[in-house]
Amino acid sequence: MEQKKHIGFRIWLYFRNGWSMYFAFVLAAVNTLTVTYYLAIEKVPALGTIFPNFGMYIVITVGIGIPLLTLIGYAHYKKTAGHRAEVDVNIETNPYMCRHIVNTQFNLKLELKSNEMLLKLSKNEKFTDEEIKEIVELKNEIVNHVEKRTFENKLDLKFIKENISRRKE
């Protein structure tokens, strides 16, 4: 893979991540606290008794906001379908991720079959015709898939949907 070929997009990616994850995040938090205090809290006398000054507003808001937003983030990853949908979209749109998942699945199948064979050989047992047929079928499945797949034809994504995703049901 030629990394220099896409240097502009790489720089753009690093810039966007630096901007959105760090700079814009901090700036947005400061902006939200400042605007809400000086345009809302300061203008409403009842809220002024709860938040007597900007420093106290920050302490209370951060004290409530960080745990609350952490719980919301936890729910996003662990309790809702939101994160699963993001992962699904990433898999559907990233052929390299698909390839990695499919290769891992094939490696697991091969490893299990190899372990079965080693155990059988270590006991000086012969393979049955059915076991040999299973080994040949597994080999053929992998060879056929690898020979046909490209990053453009989405064969890896089809494999994931047919062989891995269905197990959730």
Image: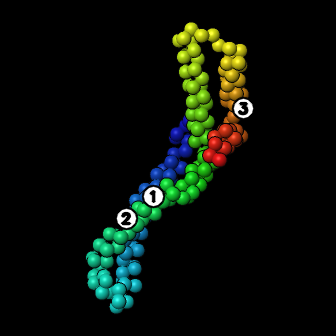
Residue 157: x percent and y percent? 66, 42
Task: Identify the residue under disc 1.
Answer: 74
Residue 91: x percent and y percent? 60, 46
User: Residue 116 falls in which quadrant of the image?
Assistant: top right
Callout 3: helix, strand or loop? Answer: helix
Q: CA distance from mark 2 to mark 1?
A: 10 Å
Vertical placement of 89 versus 167: above or below?
A: below
Single out the mark in the foreground, 2 or 3.
2
What quarter of the picture does the N terminus occupy? top right
Residue 159: x percent and y percent? 68, 38
Closer-to-camera residue (150/113) = 113
Question: Identity of the amino acid at label 2?
Answer: Pro
User: Residue 39 falls in which quadrant of the image?
Assistant: bottom left
Residue 73: x percent and y percent? 45, 60
Closer-to-camera residue (99/152) = 99
Q: CA distance from mark 1 to mark 3?
A: 40 Å
Question: Identity of the amino acid at label 3?
Answer: Lys
Mark nearer the N terminus (2 vs 3): 2
Vertical placement of 7 versus 24: above or below?
A: above
Relative to 56, 101 lies left or right: right
Dot 3, how many residues are within 10 Å of its Cα: few (below 14), some (14-19), or many (20+)? few
Single out the mark in the foreground, 1 or 3.
1
Task: Identify the residue under disc 2.
Answer: 67
Residue 5 appears in the figure: yes
Give residue 148's mark. 3
Mark nearer the N terminus (1 vs 3): 1
